[in-house]
Amino acid sequence: MLWQRLRDGYARLDARYHPEPRRPYEYPINRYYAHRLDTLLTWAADRLGFSPNQATALSAAAGLAAAGALAAHWFVAAAVLLQLHHLLDGVDGNLARYHQCCSTIGHRLDQLSDQLVRFVLFVVLVVVAHVPAWLGLAMLATLYLDLALVAWVITPCARRYPLVRSRWKKWFMDRGLMPGFDIFTLYALVSLCLLLHAPVLAVVLVTLLKTLDWSYRLWECARSWLASQSKGSAPS
């Protein structure tokens, strides 16, 4: 009985702060983890009178505190704070939509704070892990190459051509899931590695998995472009 009341209360909060369906495709880390918890954090922030921009600042503070804890070799604290950053990252948008105060400035502030946390955290991770310079540079390079490719190649390709999906990926997408290694999936892996006191493993996993992620998406773009060219050159 108590459990049912809790579930009903949560459902009401979720409907309040998420009145519309979420994106058509979500990364599993968000659907099954972050979005299940950010409803409660949004409710708490709303009750405390936080504005969306204040929630953004709080998320950034948690992320930078995670980097500071990592620099001090407080690995467990860093892991927890990094996940708090992830969970708080959705609160600002939830509040802005609920109170109908979305703004370009708020969106830009959210983007800048996310990029600041990402840069500081991964630089500190490289230093703390004491990995070879080439590996540290490779990790940072693949993270920022991914951003460039998404902006200049992958997104324009998706807008111009119908993307040809592999059968296994289509299986996930038919269920509203986007398989891949987005930044928050990487944060979850980093947190897990830090709980295991294995920062070197975190660097290796981030480097390999993010490279695999954008390489596969580039392959999808190339495959889609070739398919469109074949259709265009086919006899009518």
Image (tube, rainbow, N blue to C red):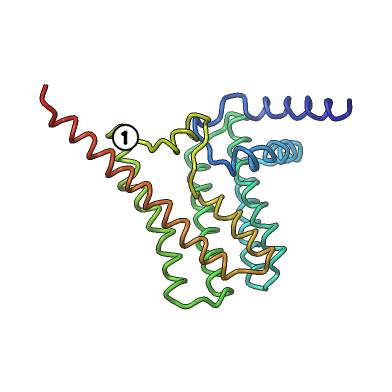
Q: In which quarter of the image is residue 92?
A: top right
- Residue placed under numbered mark 1 in the picture: 159
Q: Which quadrant would the C terminus be assigned to in this image? A: top left
Residue 51: percent from left, percent from top? 65, 40
Q: Where is residue 184 in the image (x, y as percent from the top left)?
A: 56, 50
Q: Which residue is drawn at 53% across and 64% down?
A: 122
Q: Quadrant of residue 198?
A: bottom right
Residue at (73, 38) in percent of width and height: 40
Residue 178, horizontal then vertical, whole percent:
49, 39
Query: Viewed as shown, does residue 233 lie left or right of 101?
Result: left
Question: Is residue 11 depicted above or below 133 in this figure?
Answer: above
Give the amino acid type for the residue marked by disc 1 in the picture: Arg
Secondary structure at badge 1 equals helix
- 25 left or right, relative to 41: left
Quadrant where the N terminus sits is top right
Residue found at the far top of this picture: 236
Left or right, 148 with respect to 143, comes to left
- Residue pictured at 44% horizontal, 38% vertical: 169
